[in-house]
Image (spheres, grey):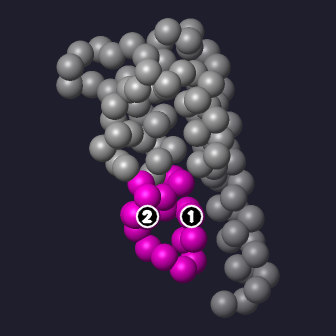
């Protein structure tokens, strides 16, 4: 592949990802803190769980993505769907930022 084309593709992909991150963060800024943990019903995930899961998925998928594939052995996917006492707005956003 032509290096200029490859660089253009990479730049475009990074800009797209950064745009999605900004969009999500602007949406999150608009909701009150308590809404992060509000669950509509027993079959739904709240925003905090979705953030926790997306962060775990991104961290797993993007870590060593050129040399390994798929799930990393240290990921505990099931716990991404459990709110723990230590899960706060601050810990969620720290995890979110680390995953990006």
Considering every residue shown, the one lying at the far left of the view is 43
- Is residue 34 positioned above or below 14 on the image? above
Dot label at residue 63: 1
Q: Which secondary structure lies at badge 2?
A: loop
**Mark 2 or mark 1: whose residue is earlier in sequence:** 1
Residue 18, image x, y percentages: 69, 48
Residue picked out by circle 2: 72
Residue 45, image x, y percentages: 32, 27
Q: Nearer the viewer, residue 17 or 39?
A: 39
* Quadrant location, the N terminus: bottom right
In which quarter of the view is residue 88 placed?
A: top right
> Residue at image x 69%, y 58%?
14
Instruction: Find out whether the residues at labels 2 and 1 contact each other: C-beta distance under 8 Å.
Output: yes
Residue 94, image x, y percentages: 64, 35
Q: Is residue 42 visible?
A: yes
The crowd level at tag 1 (other Cα within 10 Å; few <14, some 14-19, many 20+) is some
> Residue at image x 43%, y 17%?
37
Q: Which secondary structure lies at badge 1?
A: loop
The crowd level at tag 2 (other Cα within 10 Å; few <14, some 14-19, many 20+) is some
Chain part drawn in magenta: 58-75
> Residue at image x 51%, y 53%?
58
Residue 60, image x, y percentages: 48, 58
């Amino acid at each position: 592949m032509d290096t200029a084309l490859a660089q253009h593709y990479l730049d475009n992909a990074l800009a797209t990802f950064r745009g999605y991150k900004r969009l999500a963060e602007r949406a999150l800024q608009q909701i009150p803190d308590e809404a992060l943990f509000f669950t509509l019903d027993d079959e739904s995930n709240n925003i905090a769980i979705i953030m926790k899961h997306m962060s775990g998925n991104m961290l797993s998928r993007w870590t060593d993505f050129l040399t390994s594939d798929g799930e990393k052995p240290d990921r505990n996917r099931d716990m991404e769907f459990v709110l723990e006492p230590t899960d706060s707005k601050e810990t969620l956003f720290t995890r979110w930022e680390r995953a990006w």
